Image: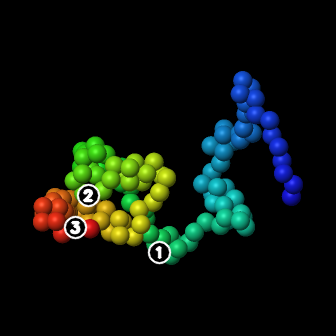
């Protein structure tokens, strides 16, 4: 397949060709039928969905704790830039970070105390 060049006019951009009214009119059964017929991206089975690991929603957790990005980063020993990158989707937390986030979800006060103690004693990384 060759290269396709497209000129984009800033004053008159091309409009999409998606008929959203038609999409909204589809029944759940029709949506399911169409999804199953797509050979490039079939829907996941319940088993496949259950085996997938959820990426933690750091922003939702931070909002639940009523913390700013800076306060969340300070409290849990992270950089502000890391929090921003996660929340804006530039990067996903690695496995160790996911573990920390899961602990923060379950026991936020205890994690903050443990990390504050580690900072005071100079035992953290």
Left or right: 41, with 65 as reference point: right
Using the numbered discs, state the Cα–Cα distance from disc 1 to disc 3 in whole angstroms. Answer: 33 Å
Q: Residue at x 65, y 67 (%)?
A: 42
Lower position in the chain sequence, tag 1 or tag 3: 1
In this rendering, the label closer to the viewer, 1 or 3: 3
Is label 2 or label 3 in front?
3
Q: CA distance from mark 2 to mark 1?
A: 30 Å
- Image spot of residue 74 (x, y percent): 24, 51
Give neighbour class at mark 1: few <14, some 14-19, many 20+ (Cα, 10 Å). Answer: few
In the rendered image of this protein, does residue 28 appear above or below residue 40?
A: above
Q: Which residue is mark 2?
A: 77
Q: Nearer the viewer, residue 102 or 116?
A: 116
The residue where tag 1 is placed is 51
- Label 2 close to label 3 by CB (< 8 Å): yes
Disc 3: which residue = 124
For the point 22% across and 67% down, the residue is 124
Residue 103 seen in this snapshot: yes
């Amino acid at each position: 397949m060759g290269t396709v060049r497209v000129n984009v006019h800033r004053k008159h951009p091309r409009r999409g060709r998606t008929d959203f009214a038609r999409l909204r009119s589809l029944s759940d059964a029709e949506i399911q039928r169409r999804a199953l017929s797509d050979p490039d991206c079939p829907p996941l089975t319940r088993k496949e969905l259950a085996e997938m690991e959820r990426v933690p929603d750091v922003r939702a957790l931070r909002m639940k704790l009523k913390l700013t990005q800076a306060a969340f980063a300070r409290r849990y020993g992270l950089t502000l830039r890391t929090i921003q990158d996660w929340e804006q989707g530039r990067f996903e937390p690695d496995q160790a970070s996911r573990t920390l986030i899961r602990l923060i979800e379950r026991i936020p006060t205890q994690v903050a105390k443990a990390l504050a103690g580690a900072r005071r004693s100079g035992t953290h990384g």
